[in-house]
Structure formats: structure tokens, C-alpha cells
């Protein structure tokens, strides 16, 4: 299936049947998130991959009892850092050095650019920036899930503070931003399963500047 066909096929599944997605597909989905674009390449977030049924049941009320939370094969919680620190930037630069076999001193300008842009911001502005990076990762995950023929439901509709408490995210230096249920659509109970995709026509969506 081509990417365009996959995007035509996907929709935000309203009901799932609880079947487990093949582990190799889940691994490919997680790899797509790992490879997602982010500002400076910093990836200021972590993704919790939840299979435990009891834990999903605890989270469901915080997500306004959306059924996909407990019907999913896996529930992904995209959680951003609570703060960008010099230590985290240093750790990232160390990773760049080791991955690309570049001496740390040659990465000083890159490190200074990241620090100059991000450390100068108030923490609340850092959080806004980091939350945007989570949305980039979610977009990558949704497209990848479609290409892998995994059904998915992106979720903003939950109470972050409650999810943070259930998962002890504050102690991990994180806060929940988005959730994504992945699994298999339940064609017998999902009222959206045969609905036509509604999108603005290209003539209205795109402005070509030549």
C-alpha cells in the first residue's frame, strides 16, 4: 500500500476490538517515532508504551472514558520533559559526538545554538516549545501506523494532571501531552468505519506562490 493509499485508509478509530498488534509492527511503529523530526534533533520527550490492561483501565476515566483506551492493543503516552537543562543539552551533544564520531569541541557552535535558543526562555515557554515537538512525533506515528496498517486514535481529550499522577510522570521529569491508542478497528461497532474522509479541497487548502 502506498503512503497516499495508507492515509486514505486511516481514520481515527472510535472502537477497537482488543486484538494484539504483531510485535514486529509495534517495533516498526516505535522506530518511526524514534526517527521523527524535532527541533535541533533534541527530541525533548519520552513515550510510554502501555500494554497492561489494569493500567489502561486506570487511565480510561482520565480520558473521559473513551473506549479505545482499554480496547487498544497498546496505548502510547507522549510525555514531554518538564524543563530543558544544560545537563540535558550536554547529554544530547555527547550522543551526537558518539554517533557521528565528531569531537566534542567541534560541536561547540551547535551546542551554543541550542543553549542560546532554549535556555534563555522561561520554563513555561520551553514547555510550549517541547509540546510542539510532541505533535511532530505524533504526526510521524500516525502516518507510520497507517503505512503499517495499524489502526490508531490520536487523543488530546484527557486530563493531563490525572494521567501524570497515575503514571508518576512528575517524578520522571515529564508531563503527558498526547495519547495514541493503537490496535485493530472494530468494524461491527465503529460508526465511523465506512464514513467518507472529509478534507478541504486542494484548491482551498493550498496557496501556490510562484
Image (tube, rainbow, N blue to C red):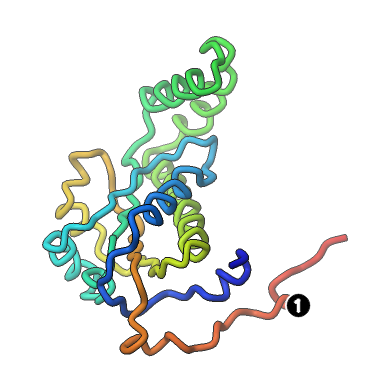
Question: Residue 44 lies in what quarter of the image?
Answer: top left
| In the rendered image, the vertical position of residue 28 relative to residue 13, given as above or below | above
Name the residue rendered at 46%, 62% in the picture. 145
Name the residue rendered at 38%, 69% in the picture. 153
**Quadrant placement of the C terminus:** bottom right
Q: Is residue 108 visible from the viewing direction of this image?
A: no
Name the residue rendered at 56%, 69% in the picture. 6
The picture places residue 31, in percent across and down from the top left corner, at 44, 46
Name the residue rendered at 32%, 69% in the picture. 157
Count of numbered labels shown in the rendering = 1
Q: Which sits in the foreground, 55 or 90? A: 55
The picture places residue 59, in percent across and down from the top left corner, at 18, 63
Quick one: which residue is furthest to the right in this view? 210
In the displayed structure image, the side of residue 117 where residue 24 appears, left or right: left
Density class for disc 1 (Cα within 10 Å; few <14, some 14-19, many ≥20) is few
The picture places residue 207, in percent across and down from the top left corner, at 77, 68
The picture places residue 52, in percent across and down from the top left corner, at 17, 58
Secondary structure found at label 1: helix
In the displayed structure image, the side of residue 94 where residue 76 appears, left or right: left
Where is mark 1, residue-wise?
A: 203
Q: Is residue 208 visible from the viewing direction of this image?
A: yes
| In the rendered image, the vertical position of residue 86 relative to residue 187, given as above or below | above
**Quadrant placement of the N terminus:** bottom right
Q: Which sits in the foreground, 112 or 23? A: 23
Q: Which sits in the foreground, 31 or 178? A: 31
Question: Residue 200 lies in what quarter of the image?
Answer: bottom right
| In the rendered image, the vertical position of residue 35 relative to residue 199, given as above or below | above
In the displayed structure image, the side of residue 179 where residue 203 appears, left or right: right
Amino acid at each position: 500500500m502506498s503512503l497516499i493509499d495508507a492515509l486514505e485508509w486511516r481514520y481515527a478509530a472510535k472502537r477497537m476490538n482488543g486484538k494484539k498488534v504483531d510485535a514486529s509492527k509495534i517495533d516498526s511503529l516505535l522506530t518511526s517515532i524514534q526517527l521523527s523530526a524535532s527541533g535541533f534533533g533534541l527530541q525533548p520527550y519520552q513515550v510510554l508504551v502501555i500494554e497492561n490492561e489494569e493500567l489502561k483501565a486506570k487511565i480510561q476515566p482520565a480520558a473521559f472514558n473513551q473506549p479505545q483506551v482499554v480496547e487498544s492493543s497498546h496505548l502510547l503516552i507522549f510525555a514531554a520533559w518538564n524543563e530543558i537543562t544544560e545537563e540535558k543539552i550536554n547529554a544530547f551533544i555527547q550522543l551526537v559526538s558518539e554517533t557521528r564520531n565528531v569531537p566534542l569541541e567541534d560541536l561547540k557552535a551547535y551546542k551554543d545554538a541550542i543553549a542560546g535558543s532554549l535556555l534563555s526562555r522561561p520554563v513555561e515557554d520551553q514547555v510550549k516549545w517541547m509540546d510542539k515537538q510532541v505533535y511532530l512525533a505524533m504526526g510521524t506515528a500516525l502516518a507510520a501506523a497507517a503505512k503499517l496498517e495499524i489502526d490508531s486514535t490520536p487523543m488530546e481529550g484527557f486530563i493531563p494532571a490525572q494521567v501524570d499522577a497515575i503514571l508518576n510522570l512528575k517524578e520522571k521529569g515529564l508531563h503527558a501531552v498526547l495519547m495514541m491508542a493503537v490496535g485493530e478497528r472494530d468494524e461491527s461497532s465503529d460508526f465511523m468505519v465506512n464514513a467518507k474522509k472529509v478534507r478541504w479541497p486542494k484548491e482551498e487548502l493550498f496557496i501556490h506562490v510562484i
